[in-house]
């Protein structure tokens, strides 16, 4: 159990049979009446966001989440197959369960998979990954590092905005949180 006074951004709680993450919280102490905590909660399974108010000191069950390091071994049809690095068990995930991580995951890549009651909630990739550019407009003489950007398709099929001097076959570092270009990889 966790007190509403201990809520922080990212805290996971169980409400109505599902896991909710605290996105925002505000402890309010009005001049008249008792204090309360106004929160914005995001459902970890569906992604829906709700606002909910708790009395100060009210206790709610804290969600027990398990983080396992797993390796993406291969893709079978639409399913992404992950293998637990300790038990060698396989887990198949749909693109919906993967979320935006499908844009940046390659075979043989390790990721942290978050479980709640043996249900996959989230796949967490490293903050940056190295991907090869497979398609982009060719760079021309005079393109500079401080100039504009152009779209490039990387090996996973995702589109990343890159500087004009990047060409096909180069390896680039991409931020998995927002899909931005971080630099060349040598």
Image (cartoon, rainbow, N blue to C red):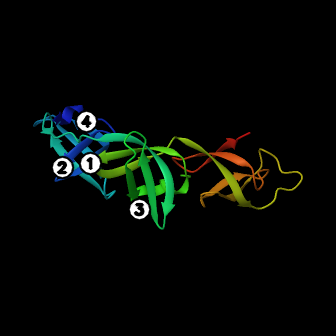
Q: Given this view, does label 1 or label 3 mark the residue nearer the observer? A: 3
Image quadrant assignment for residue 92: bottom left
Please name the residue shown 43% across and 56% down the image: 98
Q: Which one is nearer the viewer's eye here, 182 or 91?
A: 91
Q: Which residue is mark 4?
A: 7
Q: Which one is nearer the viewer's eye here, 153 or 94?
A: 94
**Mark 1 touches mark 2? (CB < 8 Å):** yes
Query: Where is 61 relative to 99, above or below?
Result: above
Q: Which residue is mark 1?
A: 20
Element at label 2: strand
Disc number placed over residue 94 in the picture, else none: 3
Q: Can residue 37 be seen in the rendering of this structure?
A: yes
- Please report whichever mark, 1 or 3, sits nearer to the chain's N-terminal start: 1
Q: Given this view, does label 4 or label 1 mark the residue nearer the observer? A: 1
Please name the residue shown 57% across and 51% down the image: 179
Q: Given this view, does label 2 or label 3 mark the residue nearer the observer? A: 3
Give the CA distance from mark 1 to mark 2: 7 Å
């Amino acid at each position: 159990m966790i007190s509403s006074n201990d809520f922080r951004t990212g805290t996971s709680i169980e409400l109505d049979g599902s896991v909710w993450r605290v996105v925002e919280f505000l402890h309010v102490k009005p001049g008249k009446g008792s204090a309360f905590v106004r929160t914005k909660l995001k459902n970890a399974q569906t992604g829906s966001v709700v606002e909910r108010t708790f009395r100060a000191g009210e206790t709610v069950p804290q969600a027990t989440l398990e983080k396992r390091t797993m390796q993406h071994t291969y893709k079978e049809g639409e399913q992404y197959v992950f293998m637990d690095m300790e038990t060698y068990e396989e887990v198949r995930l749909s693109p919906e369960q993967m979320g935006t991580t499908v844009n940046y995951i390659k075979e043989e890549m390790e990721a942290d998979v978050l479980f709640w009651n043996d249900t996959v909630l989230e796949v967490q990739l490293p903050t940056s990954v190295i991907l090869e550019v497979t398609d982009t407009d060719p760079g021309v003489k005079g393109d500079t590092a401080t100039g504009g950007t152009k779209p490039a398709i990387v090996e996973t099929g995702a589109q990343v905005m890159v500087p004009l001097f990047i060409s096909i076959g180069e390896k680039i570092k991409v931020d998995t949180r927002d899909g931005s270009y971080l630099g060349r990889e040598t």
